Amino acid sequence: MNTLRLSAQDPRTPEIAAGILRRGGLVAVPTETVYGLGADGLNPAAVKRIFLAKGRPGDNPLILHVTGVEQLPQFCHDIPQAAYRLAQAFWPGPLTMVLPANDCVPRETTGGLDTVAIRCPQTPVTREIIRLAGVPVAAPSANLSGKPSTTTAQHVLHDHDGRIDAVVDGGPCAVGVESTIVDLTEDRPRLLRPGGVGPEALLAVLGDLVIDRAVTGLLADGDVVKAPGMKYRHYAPQEPVIIVAGSREKAARYIHAHFQPGDRVLCFAEELPLYAGCAPLAYGLEADPLSLSAGLFAALRDLDDPAVRRVFARCPVGGGVAYAVQNRLNKAAGFHIVDAEAAE
Ligand code: AMP
Ligand code: MG
């Protein structure tokens, strides 16, 4: 199969991409979070092709992408007021809500669950493609399962060239980490995955928020999870990642003391001078957390290389999008965190 390259700037692109989706094909689309591998979310055969292309386990559900809050009642029921307040505050944008699914949503899309995850993306070309397709677009991140997510069209082609119908190139993603997911199907709203919308912003709208255990720690085998995707190893390059926490100076002393040939350092741009000789790679500025989220997956992809032995990573602390960066790095490291302050 020849994978079509479509430009987000070309006025013909939305109709071409929508046509492919209507015919049951796969189109990778840009969003403000990451590139998604899209298919008609109401067509079980099309959705199955997503799982096949990614090598994704069938019980890992997909997010349905819609054009706006007015579509919610088509795909879910028992919608609480909180859902409308969240949509008002954050849609279009990097927020996904989990709600009870209507029967029109195939179980292939929901990974067998009776709930469905729904989001309205910010990127105009993608909303236009969804509108023209006339169907909600199921789209997980467009990486091969288990690999760092795709934040450029080049990443998508690296993983899927010749295996999907088309990719729409909209340039690098502005947020760079997957959407915030909030489950609204229980008594209390529950954060299943942090993303571009930070926990404080959610709390300000909801007045209450439970942080799911899948966000903050490793899940044990056999744990029952609300966020099925979170039980799989995620976001990680092939070699071990070790997060080194603590002040700039103490972290640098720890890393220099333990650095061996083949190791790499993933750090903040402000820290580059500290790691001369340690093959440092900066993924953004510590002072600008959005630059860290935007750069994280491209950096993890660069480090996904058999020549790399280990990665010592510096991780931001704080709320907002920094909380999501911390979550993805923790997952990539399997929560292997060294405290440089205590190590001295
Ligand atoms: P991805 O699109 O690859 O970033 O992953 C989508 C993630 O959304 C899944 O891995 C799940 O963690 C989450 N998700 C999707 N649908 C549901 C649902 N119905 N209930 C809970 N979590 C969901
Ligand atoms: Mg993913």
Image (tube, rainbow, N blue to C red):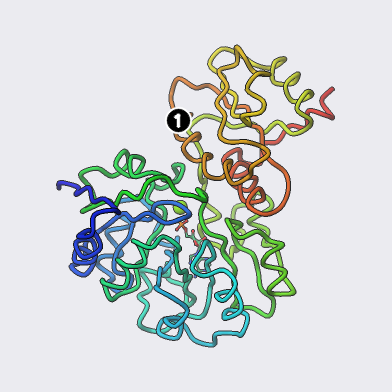
Side of 325 relative to 50 (left or right): right
* Residue at 23 percent of width and 51 percent of height: 6
Residue 311: give x, y in percent of width and height. 58, 27
* Residue at 60 percent of width and 52 percent of height: 221
Q: Is residue 37 above or below residue 337?
A: below
Side of 162 relative to 249 (left or right): left
Q: In this view, does 304 lie above or below 103?
A: above
Judged from this view, the residue extending furthest toward the left is 1
* Residue at 41 percent of width and 69 percent of height: 64
Side of 44 relative to 216 (left or right): left
Mark 1 crowdedness (10 Å alpha carbons): few <14, some 14-19, many ≥20: few
Query: Within the image, what quadrant is residue 102 found in?
Result: bottom left
**Total number of numbered labels?**
1
Query: Within the image, what quadrant is residue 212 found in?
Result: bottom right
Residue identified by numbered label 1: 302
Residue 193: give x, y in percent of width and height. 59, 59
Q: Which of 158 and 126 is in front in this view?
A: 126
Residue 118: give x, y in percent of width and height. 47, 71
Amino acid at circle 1 = Asp
Q: Circle 1 — which element?
A: helix
